[in-house]
Image: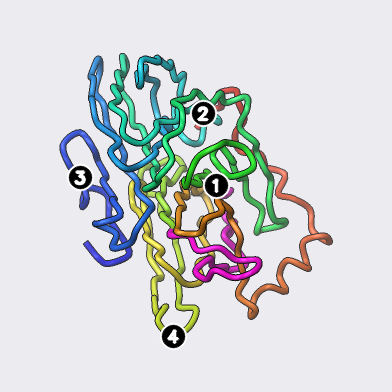
């Protein structure tokens, strides 16, 4: 396992295909687990000091937490629809059961407040179409500060049409100052297309002394990139292969806010968007199932 790129299977533990904790990442807050369940399989786990969201990547499940039960309809794949989800508070015991089997992401954050376990319907997820031209992408804001209450956790899904770039212009959030917040970030990838050989690419680079980082990585389904600091972007989807990534963010700032600073060398790109049309393939998904 490299310091910043975790390949599928390199951080597996038991029923979890992926376990990224603050300790394993070498930071203080952000975490991600991916749970794989077989037919009629049940897994119980404790959230400990972290708040979490159960987000179906594929399949459906029933989960219980704090005496409440939530049925998550889920989806066939991340490219087929926007999904419902459930929020789990810290210091809780949860149980997840899937009749048909599936894979479920658990983005999390080390936090102090204990909130209430809740269900998040797919119909309530804010779908944002961002950028323009070949920088067009879809952002499913299921757990950002404007759409869902949490203590520290910020998590969104980004879908990039084949041939487009997203997370562009490159940006960062590694300083506490006006207009910028400090957030550790995890990128978890899935690649679409007609075969299982699809790839994407992710760039991360340093933003100053003490923030040295240099990643230009090919990513496949199930791969993860850890971003403790630095400029990140673009995320590149080659022709023929739409790209999905789950962003998980949390940090020490007292305010739960996603405030970014563009790389000044590339910030001018935003000024070109008003003269370009949004990619007509967007949105790639909605609340109804599509072929994926």
Location of mark 2 (residue)? 83
Which residue corresponds to the image point at 36% horizontal and 52% vertical from the top-left? 220
Circle 3 residues within 10 Å: few <14, some 14–19, many ≥20: some
Residue 49 on image: x %, y %: 31, 42
Of the numbered discs in the image, which one, if any, rests on residue 158? 1
Quick check: 138 above or below 177? Answer: above
SS at circle 1: strand
Judge from the rendering whether residue 283 lies leftward or rightward of residue 116; answer left or right: right
Measured in 3D between alpha carbons, the distance from the residue under mark 2 to the one under mark 3, in whole angstroms, is 24 Å
Which residue corresponds to the image point at 59% horizontal and 34% vertical from the top-left? 285
Quick check: 59 above or below 149? Answer: above
Mark earlier in primary sequence (2, 3): 3
Location of mark 4 (residue)? 209
Q: Nearer the viewer, residue 190 or 142?
A: 142
Of the numbered discs in the image, which one, if any, rests on residue 21? none
Measured in 3D between alpha carbons, the distance from the residue under mark 4 to the one under mark 3, in whole angstroms, is 33 Å
Location of mark 3 (residue)? 12
Judge from the rendering whether residue 202 lies leftward or rightward of residue 256; answer left or right: left
Q: Farthest residue to the left: give it.
A: 14
Which residue corresponds to the image point at 53% horizontal and 44% vertical from the top-left? 156
Residue 198 on image: x %, y %: 40, 50
Tell which tag, 4 or 3, sits nearer the viewer: 4
Quick check: 288 above or below 151? Answer: above
Q: Nearer the viewer, residue 6 or 229?
A: 229
Measured in 3D between alpha carbons, the distance from the residue under mark 1 to the one under mark 4, in whole angstroms, is 30 Å
**Quadrant (top left/top right/bottom left/bottom right) for the N terminus:** bottom left
Q: Quadrant of residue 59?
A: top left
């Amino acid at each position: 396992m490299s310091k910043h790129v975790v390949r599928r299977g390199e951080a597996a533990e038991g029923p979890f295909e992926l376990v990224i904790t603050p300790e394993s990442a070498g930071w203080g807050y952000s975490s991600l687990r991916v749970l794989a369940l077989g037919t009629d399989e049940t897994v119980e786990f404790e959230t400990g000091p972290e708040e979490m969201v159960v987000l179906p990547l594929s399949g459906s499940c029933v989960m219980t937490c704090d005496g409440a039960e939530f049925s998550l309809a889920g989806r066939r794949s991340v490219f087929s629809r926007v999904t419902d989800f459930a929020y789990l508070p810290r210091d809780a015991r949860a149980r997840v059961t899937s009749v048909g089997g599936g894979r479920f992401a658990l983005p999390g954050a080390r936090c102090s407040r204990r909130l209430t376990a809740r269900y998040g319907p797919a119909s309530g997820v804010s779908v944002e179409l961002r950028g323009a031209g070949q920088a067009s992408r879809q952002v499913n804001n299921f757990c950002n500060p404007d759409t869902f209450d949490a203590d520290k956790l910020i998590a969104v899904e980004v879908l990039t049409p084949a041939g487009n770039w997203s997370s562009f212009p490159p940006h960062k959030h590694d300083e506490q100052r006006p207009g910028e917040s400090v957030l550790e970030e995890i990128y978890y990838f899935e690649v679409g297309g007609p075969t299982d050989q699809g790839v994407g690419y992710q760039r991360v680079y340093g933003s100053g002394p003490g923030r040295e980082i240099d990643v230009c990585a090919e990513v496949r389904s199930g791969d993860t990139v850890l971003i403790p600091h630095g400029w990140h972007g673009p995320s590149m989807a080659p022709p023929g292969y739409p790209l999905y990534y789950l962003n998980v963010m949390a940090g020490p700032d007292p305010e739960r806010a996603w405030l970014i600073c563009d790389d000044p060398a590339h910030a001018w790109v935003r000024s070109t968007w008003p003269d370009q049309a949004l990619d007509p393939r967007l949105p790639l998904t909605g609340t109804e199932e599509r072929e994926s």
